[in-house]
Image (spheres, rainbow, N blue to C red):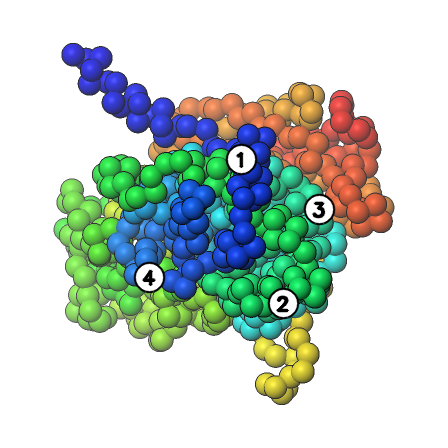
Amino acid sequence: MKKLILLPALLATLAAFAANPKITQAHKDRAAALVAKMTVEEKIDLISGKVDGFMTHAIPRLGIPSVRMADGPQGVRNVDGRNIQSTFYPCGMSAAASWNREAVWKMGAGIGSAAKAHGVQIMLGPGVNIYRSALCGRNFEYYGEDPFLAGETAASYIDGIQQQGVMATIKHFALNNQEYDRHGTSSNADERTINEIYFPAFRKAVEKADVAAVMTSYNLVNGMHAAENPWLVKENLRAWGFEGIVMSDWTSTYSTVGFLKGGVDFEMPRNYVSNQEAVKALLENGVVTEADLDDKCQHILQAFAAYGFLDNSLEADPAAEDPAVSRQRAYEVALEGPVLLKNEGNILPLKPGKKPIAVLGPNANVMACGGGSGWVNPEDGKGVTLADGLLHMGKGYKVELLGSPKPEVLTKAAAVVVCLGFDRLSETEGSDRKYTLPGGQDELVESVLKYNENVIVVVNSGGEFDLSRWGEKVKAILLDWYPGQEGGNALAAIISGKVSPSGRLPFTFWGALKSNPAQKWYKAAPQHPSKNRDRYDFTTYGEGVFLGYRGVEHFGVKPLYPFGYGLTYSSFEYADASVVPAGDGFDVSFSVRNVGPVAAKEVAQVYVAPAKAPVLRPAKELKGYDKQLIGKGASQRFTIHLGPDAFRYYDEAAHDWKTVPGEYKILIGSSSADIRLEVPVRVNAGRNHGI
Ligand code: BGC
């Protein structure tokens, strides 16, 4: 009897851990056989989306079905032209701030199962564009400023989705780091900067997670639109071994020949430049050949074959998702992401008591989410708002939700939680946002401070914002990102101390917009005064590889809160570091003891400081991390492997990576500015380093 009950659970677990599909020779052969049977018209049809924008063309004669896509990346946004309700997970920045691969994997798996339940085969996420400035309207969808953290987060998320038999699409390739004038600005950067900072997350998605699809970006890269850029797609992406589908972003193609020759397989959402007439004209005059079309069809069909889209039913399968499991997963990730920036006098966690805790602010009772294609409607249509969560904190807490700052309640309150931040109008795709919080929010904090000094500010945001007017005066600041439909429950667990906060900043919080050295080169306004300009605008990535924390020593600017920083309700001591050769690199081991009052998770970070090199290198770069729950008074051993890529830099002259032999330092710490242990290692050139 017991066996019978366990069997379905076991099968479900096995299904959840099914391998991430890979394209094999058999899939390639099958695709080639289909391509050989296709007419020119069918080939032209297959390489673009259908009129409704999120479907591919079916070719019933050859058994090729219509495949459905949906946004992405924090849930399933839309099906068949309608926004739908689906589990709304924390945003990308929250996932990155979790520094927790397992939690991110679960989120990916949850989104994959939701996609299946809704009949979606290709999810349009994750987004991995690197954070250069607080102003980029889509930072919330992305994974922060560090290529290693972004790559690890992307690989976990992609693996989670794809193990459900649903394709992930990594986007937007590449250098789409601002929303301002996104169709018309060229991101101009040197080859080393692109390879060290902007490519690695995409490359890891290909090499480590076998991502099935890649979406190009709107912008130009060094003068050429991404969707028509053979340097990006053919000379780089394909050279990394990518054999899946490359699609354009929605309406980002600009010419038929550029699209056909550039290496992108799929024009989305439909055939603006790849329609029958335009393509046939170019075939007739010999500018393109049928082989150009064949390449694209081959990529599309071999990926479809690997995912079983040519054999299995693509109907919605509501049984694929268990809503209770999804809700639990959304809650678990929401617990991991929030970053506690400040906690003066250990005001948090709040203790229960007779005096009320007042809650107010524009984001208290709304389901805050960034806007655009990344917006998601919660599965029950409303989700658990921050106020909902706090009102149900239970066990002796008296919580009062205020519509406006009522002096008589504020003066009596034990503490005031002020919920601030952006929303789908103020932080969104298609435009950059302001540095200051919208609509009188600074004034709100100032007026609350007049009546009560125990102010805790909780902020929904995808990045840094201006806290100069009240940052030093309030007692606590919690950066809550867009925490998804379980965000209120997670906040209640953190505020009440049921769970210690454990998120860490995935970017440098400079404290002022102009303290960020990259801001000087960030394009926030047109360079050309005329709107009818006759040439493309551009933004030069003048900070080069010295972006974010990599620029702290280089530019000599000290941030307010450093990359990797975040408080917990406990404290940790690091000891006993050892670095030993292992496999293709080194194993870095050390012990972390929880010396504080409660069990808490610590994110241990391993940075590498370079040996002397022929080029200037950042003082340190993140190359490994791990997050572990450590009981009060307990000690945990961490072991983090560093492969050969932990030491190399990109050599522009050789157009390749290079490792300089010499003495490097392994820096182990709790943030990029809080290094606790330092171990020198000797690295030899070549594969086996040895010490
Ligand atoms: C966005 C993509 C999105 C697509 C489809 C575009 O505007 O840039 O990220 O997947 O729309 O909604």
Q: Nearer the viewer, mark 1 or mark 4?
A: 1
Find residue 396 and report its image quarter. Answer: top left
Closer to the camera in the image, 140 or 313: 313
Q: Is residue 524 above or below residue 480?
A: below
Location of residue 684 in the rendering, given as x and y in whole percent from the top left corner: 81, 28
Which callout, 4 or 2, points at the residue further toward the start of the chain? Answer: 4
Q: Is the residue indicated by label 1 positioned so its CB lies within 8 Å of ligand 1?
A: no
Which callout, 1 or 4, points at the residue further toward the start of the chain? Answer: 1
Closer to the camera in the image, 513 or 487: 487
Residue, disc 4: 81
Q: Nearer the viewer, mark 1 or mark 3?
A: 1
Q: Is residue 226 left or right of residue 49?
A: right
Q: What type is the residue that disc 4 sits on? A: Gly
Residue 531 seen anywhere in this rendered image of the structure: yes
Residue sitting at 66 percent across and 45 percent down? 238
SS category of the residue bearing label 1: helix
Q: Are marks 3 and 2 in contact (CB under 8 Å)?
A: no
